[in-house]
Amino acid sequence: MKERRRSVRQNCRLCGRVYFNDGRKSKSLPCTIRDISYEGARIELSDPADIPDAIDLYIPRQHRMLHASVRWRHGNRVGVAFASVLLNLTAPPTGYAVLGGSISIVP
């Protein structure tokens, strides 16, 4: 298969969190980021079935929140393309709370 990416992905194992709105309320799920580049990432989720086509990906170690669109799904793996960096953070964003080492949305 021919590689179609414009930027090289770096293998990694970063903890992350996917945020999305399911039409009723905001939700979040933990994920593992397996590789990442300037333009996108490959993430793993325990149950990716609920993930919509537009998500926000929070990477605590990098203090970043990125808006992304899902490009492909295969089993528990999801490929995303970044639309923009929403926030470069030194702390969890307003409206989010850290609970047990993860970030949860505060209504």
Image (spheres, rainbow, N blue to C red):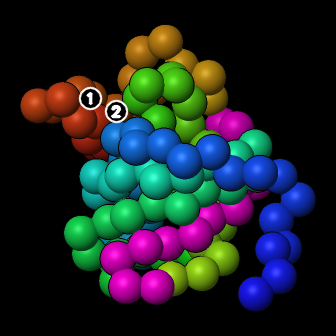
C-beta proximity under 8 Å, tags 1 and 2: yes
Instruction: State the SS at label 1.
Output: strand
**Residue extending furthest toward the right:** 6
Residue bearing mark 2: 96
Q: Which residue is mark 1?
A: 97
Q: Which residues are magenta?
A: 74-86
Compared to residue 63, the image places residue 20 above or below, namely below
| Residue plotted at (60% across, 56% down) | 41
The C terminus is located in which quarter?
top left
107 up-or-down from 78: above or below: above
Compared with 63, 67 (above or below) is: below
Residue 16 falls left or right of residue 70: left
| Image coords of residue 54 (percent x, y) | 59, 67
Q: Is residue 80 above or below residue 61?
A: below
Label at residue 35: none
Amino acid at pointer 2:
Tyr
Please rate how many residues cluster around mark 2, counting C-alpha atoms within 10 Å: few if below 14, some from 14 to 19, many from 20.
Answer: some
How crowded pointer 1 is (Cα within 10 Å; few <14, some 14-19, many 20+) is rated as: some
Q: Mark 2 falls on what kind of element?
A: strand
Q: Main secondary structure of the magenta part?
A: strand
Can residue 67 be seen here? The reply is no
Determine the residue positioned at 40% across, 43% down.
Answer: 13
Distance Cα–Cα, label 1 vs label 2: 4 Å
Q: Position of residue 63 (x, y in %)?
A: 51, 23
Disc 1 residue type (three-letter): Ala
Residue 94: % across, % down: 43, 25
Residue drawn at (43%, 25%), measured in percent from left and top?
61
Q: Is residue 2 visible?
A: yes
